[in-house]
Amino acid sequence: MPDSLETARSAAAKAREAAAADPAKLPALVQALQLVGDALRDSDLAAAEAAYREAIAVAEGRELPVGTLANVRMNLATLLDFSDRAEQATSFYEEAIADFEALGTKDAKEVAAQLRNNLAMTYKDLGKYALAEQHYLRALETLEANHGRNSETVATLFNNLGGLYYVAGFPDQAKDMFTDALDVRTIVLGAAHRDTAQAHSNLGTACHELQDNAAAKQHFETALSILEAQIQDERRSFEATSQDYIAMLEMSGDQAAADTVRSRAEKVLASA
C-alpha cells in the first residue's frame, strides 16, 4: 500500500474518532476522507468514490463552514463524469459550484467557472443544450472578468460555445463564437499555432453549414497550411483536418477539389 494512502487512512481513522467525541471536529474528518479518496483515484475508483460519499454523508445536516465540502463534491463530480456516469455527476457539479461561489474569493470563483465549463460539456453530451449554454455563459462572464478577453482561457470558452451552438442547430451563433475564438487565439497564440489552426477548421465547418463554401475553403486551407508546417508534431491533427475538409468538399459536390486535397494529404503524410 502506498505510503500516501496509508497515511491518509490513518489520519481519517483518527479524525473519525475525534469527530465522534466532538462534532466540531467534523470538518477535519471531511478533509481526511477527501484525502483518502484522492489517494485512491488512480488505483481504485470504487473505493475513492466511497470515501468521497462518506465525507458528504458525515456532513449531511450539519452546520459546517462554507466550502467544507467544495473539494469533495468537485472531486466526486469529476470522478463520476470521467467514469461515464455523467448524469450522476451533474448534481455534485452544481453543489460544488455553489460552494466555491459562496466562498467569494477570486480564486474560488475561477474554480467555479472551470467547473461550469465541465458541467456545460456534460449537459451538452446529455442533449440539455439550454442548461449547457447557461453554464458556458456564466463561466465566460467570470473568466473574461478575471483574465480579460484576450486570453486562451476565454478563447476556449468561445470555442466550446461555438461547438454547442453548432450541434444545437444554430450555425449563425456558432460562426460568431468560432470567429471570436479565432480572433483571440490569433492575438494570444499567434497565427501559426495549432490551436489557431483548430479555430480556422471549426470556423470553416460553420461557414459550410451556412453555405458559404468559399469562406469554408479558405479557413480549411489556412488550417492545413499551419499544420503542414508542423507536420512532425501535428500529424494526427493534419490528418483529421484533411478528412474534415475532404468530407466538406464532397458534401458540396466538389469531387475534383476533394480528390486534390486527398492527394495532397497523402503526400504530406507519406513524407512525414
Image (spheres, rainbow, N blue to C red):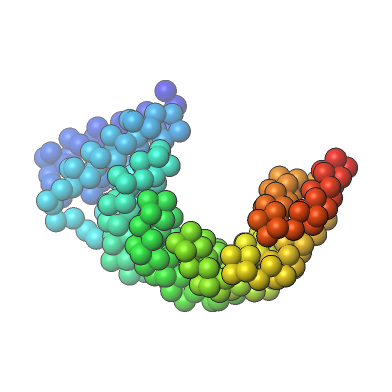
Image quadrant in which the N terminus is located: top left
Side of 116 relative to 154 (left or right): left
Q: Position of residue 233 (x, y in %)?
A: 76, 47
Instruction: Mark yes or no: residue 111 visible.
Output: no
Q: Position of residue 159 (x, y in %)?
A: 55, 64
Instruction: Mark yes or no: residue 98 visible.
Output: yes
Residue 223 in which image quadrant: bottom right
Q: Furthest-top residue in view?
A: 1
Which residue shows up at 59% across the image and 73% down it?
A: 180
Side of 88 relative to 151 (left or right): left
Residue 155 in which image quadrant: bottom right
Q: Is residue 247 above or below residue 178?
A: above
Which residue shows up at 46% across the image and 70% down it?
A: 140
Q: Is residue 162 above or below residue 94?
A: below
Which residue shows up at 40% across the image and 58% down it?
A: 120
Which residue shows up at 12% across the image and 51% down it?
A: 61
Residue 43 in which image quadrant: top left
Nearer-the-camera pick, 226 or 18? 226
Q: Position of residue 126 (x, y in %)?
A: 37, 51
Q: Is residue 8 above or below residue 108?
A: above
Q: Furthest-front residue in view?
A: 253
Q: Position of residue 10 (x, y in %)?
A: 30, 31
Side of 227 relative to 87 (left or right): right
Give the total of numbered labels. 0
Image quadrant in which the C terminus is located: top right
